[in-house]
Image (cartoon, helix red, strand yellow):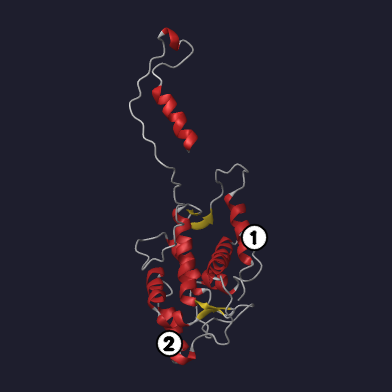
Amino acid sequence: MKQAREKIGYFLSRRFLGSKRAEGYGKVKWLSCDVADYKPKPNPKEKKLKIRKGLGINYPKALQRLLIALMLHHFVHTKTHQSKIYEQITITDREVREVCISHHDEIISGNVLSIIVKYYDGLAAFISRRTPYKIESRYDYNNGKIDFKKLVKELEEKQNSAYKLYNYIYQCEELNRIVESMEYGRNSLRNHLLLMVNLAINDYYKKTLVIRNGKIKIAKKVKVSSSVTEKDKFNNRLVRAKDAEMH
């Protein structure tokens, strides 16, 4: 710093610059100079994912169906685990029901909705499962029993509206008492469901998810130097997220 200040002072004292300054060429006039100690800029804070209080606007039908599938897929029995509220809800939309039941199965080529549901389930688990905390019960019995049959009925009544279903889950204290994973007992099922939905909506705004011909799909192309398609990137992230799926 001392040498830098001396160098700056030397240049400020010059009135002529260049090879012919002795002949009067290259006259300069310094307009201003400020010298201050270096202060490194603070690293920009990572933006925290905000959980919406409500869905708000009218999203395309294809996106709404995806959000419904994300919110319902833990309430049915699968080959890997039973419904996380013990009771299985009856899903009236056939495609949504099949995706929910088979979301842990091997992904079938061309079944984009299954790929997307599986991806966001794994990604949300990867984000929220930081510190293992194994517990023996699905929810805190000390605060009273949960009426799962009533919970099933209320979910079924709202299953055809992404907006009503999201609002219900957001306000549901029972789902906040139920854990998403027995191995990670600090993570509630409610937060897991809301996290998946908000990740999907954010990707829709980023155009990672696109609507084409009434169907929600993974964006085909992005401008990357390796010419990797968005679908390949999506699947690579799916592989990493898959390791976090420990239902």
Residue 202 or residue 182, whichever sits in front: 182
Residue 171 or residue 73, whichever sits in front: 171
Q: Secondary structure at mark 2?
A: helix
Residue beneath label 2, please? 150
Q: Is residue 182 visible?
A: yes
Q: Identify the amino acid type marked 1.
A: Ser
From the top left corner, tell me how far across and down residue 194 is, in percent.
45, 70
| Picture quadrant of residue 83 | bottom right
The residue most toward the top is 23
**Mark 2 Cα-neighbour bin, 10 Å: few <14, some 14–19, many ≥20:** few
| Picture quadrant of residue 37 | top left
Q: Identify the amino acid type marked 2.
A: Lys
From the top left corner, tell me how far across and down residue 186 is, in percent.
51, 78
Residue beneath label 1, please? 109
What residue lies at 37% left-to-right and 77% top-to-bottom? 171
How far is disc 2 from disc 1 in space, using C-alphas?
Answer: 37 Å
Q: Secondary structure at mark 1?
A: loop
**Mark 1 Cα-neighbour bin, 10 Å: few <14, some 14–19, many ≥20:** few
Residue 26 or residue 107, whichever sits in front: 26
The quadrant of the image that shows the C terminus is bottom right
Q: Is residue 142 above or below residue 44?
A: below
